[in-house]
Amino acid sequence: MRAVRVVEYHESLQMDDVSEPRITGPFDVIVRIGGAGVCRTDIHILEGQWAEKSGVELPYTIGHENAGWVSSVGDAVTNVAEGDKVILHPLVTCGLCRACRFGDDVHCVNSRFPGIDSDGGYAEFLKTSARSVVKIDDALEPADVAALADAGLTAYHAAAKAARRLRPGDRVVMIGAGGLGHIGIQVMAALSPAEIIVVDRNPDAVKLGVEVGATHGVVATGGHVDEVLELTGGNGAEQVLDFVGEGGSTAEGIRMTRRAGDYHVVGYGENVNVPTIDVISSEINIIGNLVGSYNDLVELMALAAQQKVTLHTAKYSLDDFQEAVDDLSAGRVRGRAILIP
């Protein structure tokens, strides 16, 4: 089968012919890929940022946001059958460790992360586990929802966590309305009664954020922190979700957070530098957000089936993988780029 591979760090991806994955265990599931999301993490992988953490042996197939159709299953699989339309939770988990037994599969101590530390979905087929596949509604197509498997799931996890702390009359700031942010805004609008303020440097992204559910749009042109403070009565927002995490957004996000509020780090790239006296005196919480759980993905798919969350996509054939990566790197993609074998 065709597969797009990381051959060396700091070099371009390469299309290769590799063997199709095969069923070797009772809970294995082989999925024919219908769509694979192109994520900024994939660019960080090529830059070598994940080399030490993942420990993956090169070459390997990249791609961790995947959806498609079940091609074959192990003899103990009962939750899906051949031909089922599915989206894949990005982690393959054991189900036996303490975290899994608490339903906190994201922190499984025996997990694999296809596309990060093992072969992923920039290919025609992908091997995963029965624990990782979620059947999707007949009205949904794999290429339309693939990026919800990680970007959407991450955004859902953060937005749902913040929404549980919001009440009518509260405000929430969403920094960034790109690939993650535009999903997070929709989730927040579906789950929370709060006013949503979207902040982005790109006026088109701000416009998209308002179109998909934000109450107010603020273009980050220099005085945007003061504009947000004015919209929140000078106090800041009860919840701030930072989908950017670099370029000064962390310091700005802290400034937008009201006393006893929560600042959620979702995007990454720079340090969060806050004097401890400021943390204590304002009693703010700084909260990290990883990808969501299997149950989070089930809930997100329910919102997608109800058309409360719609993924804005730019679609490319698998052969055009380099164009997709280049467009994402240059900021030409609005929403998420999707590769279709």
Image (cartoon, rainbow, N blue to C red):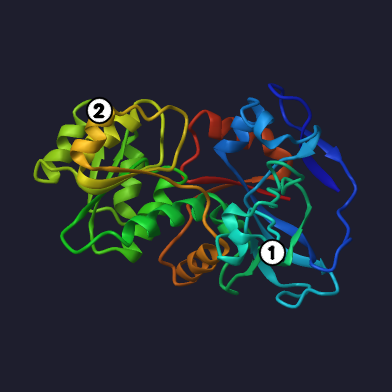
In the picture, measured across the screen, residue 209 lies left or right of residue 100, that is left
Residue 255, placed above or below residue 305: above
Which one is in front, 333 or 24?
24
**Looking at the picture, how far across and down is residue 210, in whole percent?**
29, 51
Disc 1 marks which amino acid?
Leu
- In the picture shown, does residue 288 fall above or below 69? above
Q: Provide the residue designation for mark 1.
A: 96
Would residue 220 be seen by someone viewing this image from the given angle?
no
Q: Residue at x 69, y 64 (%)?
A: 96
Instruction: Indicate the quadrant where residue 76 lies.
Output: bottom right
Can residue 136 be seen at all in this image of the molecule?
Answer: yes
Quarter-of-image position of residue 81: bottom right
Question: Which residue bears the numbered disc 2?
Answer: 221
Residue drawn at 71 percent across, 50 percent down: 112
Q: CA distance from mark 1 to mark 2?
A: 50 Å
What amino acid is labelled 2 in the image? Thr
Q: In front: 58, or 304?
A: 58
Above or below residue 279? Residue 291 is: below
Q: Secondary structure at mark 2?
A: loop
Q: Which is nearer the N-term, disc 1 or disc 2?
A: 1
Asked if the residue at tag 2 contacts the one at tag 1, i.e. Cβ–Cβ closer than 8 Å, the answer is no
- Residue at 18% x, 64% y: name it: 168
Q: Nearer the viewer, residue 191 or 317?
A: 191
Residue 31: % across, % down: 76, 61
Could you tell whether 283 is left or right of 162 in the image? left
In the displayed structure image, the side of residue 257 where residue 53 appears, left or right: right
Question: Where does the image place residue 57, in percent across and percent down from the top left?
Answer: 80, 34
Q: Residue at x 26, y 42 (%)?
A: 284
